[in-house]
Amino acid sequence: MQLKSIILASAILAALPATAFAQAAIPANVDFTASATMPSLKDPSRKDVFAVSIGDAQVKTTLELTCSAGYTQFLVVRSDKACAVAGSGSIVNPANQALLPRTQYSGGYTVAADGYTDGDGMSVNYLALGKVAPSTGTFSGSMNLKPEVTSSGAAALTATVLENLGQGGTGGVIDERVDTVDLNRLFIPSAGLPSDVGCSWSGNMVFAYQTQSWFMDLKASCNNVEYALKGNMPLTETPGVDGQTQYDLTLTLPSAEATSDDALFATSDANSDLFASADGVTAQIIMVNSKLVTIDIDGVATETPSQVDAKGQFVGTAVPVEVVRSLATMFGLLSSNLFGA
């Protein structure tokens, strides 16, 4: 009887498609590096370069953003910020770990005076590989990047953040400056695998200068499944290391234990395992900062690095690698906002 059970179980396992095993074995860990060179902080006529690498067990992608600074001359002539996007990606052959060229990125985006940024200027070309024919994909949707008029969604999130920070017992919020990023069904296409159909991102991100933290309320729609991710990403100095800072990202899925806004203000100990208990996406990104310059940010003289070299890893818990990979790609596209001033 026991032998029959073993034979039956073996037959069932053999009948399952190979992709079932492949998908189950893929860890939702995505490595991320970024090098931000920003001469425009001192000279608006020069262009900033953001070199980004994103890699996991299935896909390796490199992106390069070359961005001109948006500025106004003589109080009349305005130059919109524009970023050219280029790059390529390879698929990892699971049989021998060989990298097989698969994607080519091109195009770019322009940030208008009101912050509106159309996503469909970026595209990806999929090279033929094996039995898969060549094809093309297009980014779509839009972003609002540090808009002069804050959207209603970002305004509501900002109000929640500032209200919470004002309850800290330190005499109220001293610095009410914020940066905001709005995502309006921003579609990031597949990284090259047929099983990866891409993700659409909506929601808001607010950077509060008072606490040097990003607060995020995001929704990702991937292959008809929605992931609601809410949390924060404080920017802190790395303990005991000069010239180094870090982002500690905690984005959690909805849970019965936490109310909606609690997730925005969740905190973790940066010196321990940040990621063991919460379902969602977490990351620690270490940044080596150099070439400090002093610039004006919303009327306040602020010292900021013009060179940032960042490295870290995104980790998904109860979130598929495709979602984590798409989030890391979005962070790459937002390099100017996350690592710049």
Image (cartoon, rainbow, N blue to C red):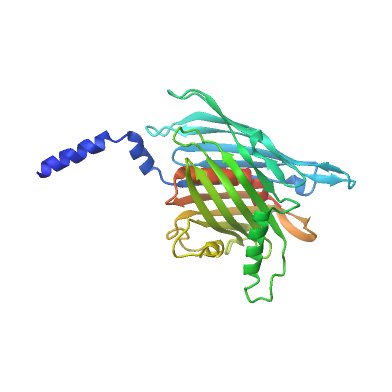
Say which of 120 and 244 sits in front: 120
Where does the image place residue 119, in percent across and percent down from the top left? 64, 38
Quarter of the rendering containing residue 173: bottom right
Where does the image place residue 104, in percent across and percent down from the top left? 57, 30
Say which of 200 and 57 sits in front: 200
Say which of 47 and 140 sits in front: 140
Answer whether residue 249 is visible to the viewer in this image: no
Say which of 2 and 35 sits in front: 2
Quarter of the rendering containing residue 88: top right
Where does the image place residue 245, in percent across and percent down from the top left? 61, 58
Name the residue: 34% across, 38% down: 20
Where does the image place residue 146, in percent across and percent down from the top left? 71, 51
Name the residue: 79% across, 49% down: 42
Answer whether residue 258 is visible to the viewer in this image: yes
Name the residue: 63% across, 38% down: 64
Relative to 43, does residue 242 appear above or below in the rendering?
below
What quarter of the picture does the N terminus occupy? top left
Number of marks in the image?
Answer: 0
Q: Residue furthest left?
A: 1
Name the residue: 59% across, 43% down: 185
Relative to 87, does residue 37 appear above or below in the rendering?
below
Q: Is residue 66 left or right of residue 45?
A: left
